[in-house]
Image (cartoon, rainbow, N blue to C red):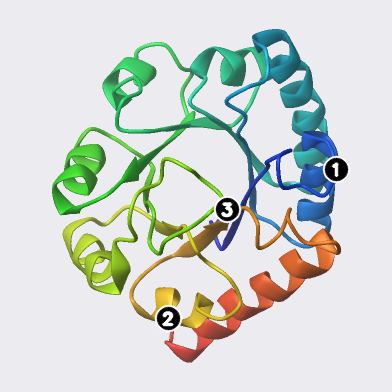
Amino acid sequence: MGYDLYVITDEGIGCGRSHPEQARLAVEGGADVVQLRDKALSSRGLLAAAREIRVVTRAADALFIVNDRLDIALAAGADGVHLGQDDLPVAGVRSIAPPGFIVGVSVGNVAEASLAAAGGADYVALSPTFATGSKADAGPGRGLDMLRAVRSAVSVPLLAIGGIGPHNVCEVIGAGADGVAVISAVVGQEDAAGAARRLKALVKAAKNGSGR
């Protein structure tokens, strides 16, 4: 399964929709992956949402990833976990998780990407590729040159996240990204399913145009 369109849920900008409802609309629009991300929700609330999303994604044959929380991911039967630079190391996750469990890592430069890939990450995400308002702690955009440099340094799937929308999908795919990870460009839209559908089509068109 690919990573063409990777949608991250966010109740803060999700037009009043719950995490599971955002997930349902995302996969309706063709999302390949849904990530549950919520820094404020209690562990009990996060697990409840995760279990609902697991049902939604399984029915759609989409991957389900939990941000940061390995415990929630394992308890909900998620496909994997997404780690930041301050989270558990990939090797630590591998020592606990079942075979086939997906581990993704946010990276900001070539060194971090190379370390993550060497440590066994299944994919890396350049974060943020462009400046974004969806994540207050994201920092400045890394840019397309950094995306190209990371692409040259690692062979695992590479995602672009941060400031991604219809206006720059072709650019990031052309720079070597295997897919785009988005928040506001899908869940922040009134017609979230339609937004996902349009983004997925743009990714496919960009890949076809580059011969990938």
Q: CA distance from mark 3 to mark 2?
A: 23 Å
From the viewer's perspective, is residue 107 above or below residue 98?
below
Q: Could you say which disc has been placed on residue 1 in the image? A: 3
Mark 3 touches mark 2? (CB < 8 Å): no
Considering only order in the chain, which callout, 1 or 3, is on the residue closer to the N terminus?
Answer: 3
Q: Which residue is mark 2?
A: 171
Upstream in sequence: badge 1 or badge 2: 1
Q: Secondary structure at mark 2?
A: helix
Task: From the top left corner, tell me how far across and down residue 126 is, in percent.
Answer: 35, 54
194 or 122, which is in the foreground?
194
Give above or below for 116 relative to 173.
above
Q: Amino acid at mark 2?
A: Glu
Rendered image quadrant of residue 59: top right
The residue positioned 73% from the left and 53% from the top of the image is: 187
Give amino acid for label 3.
Answer: Met
The image shows residue 35 at horizontal and vertical percentages of 61, 40
Nearest to the eye among marks 3 and 1: give it. Answer: 1
Numbered mark located on residue 16 in the image: 1
Dot 2 crowding, Cα within 10 Å, few <14, some 14–19, many 20+: few
Label placed on residue 202: none
Q: Nearer the viewer, mark 3 or mark 2?
A: 2
Task: Indicate left or right for 63 with 119 as reference.
Answer: right
Q: CA distance from mark 3 to mark 1?
A: 30 Å
Which percent across, then down, holds residue 54?
Answer: 75, 30
**Labels 1, 2: front one:** 1
Answer above or below: position of 49 versus 32.
above
- Residue 79, by quadrant, is top right
Element carrying mark 1: loop
Q: Is residue 18 left or right of residue 75?
A: right
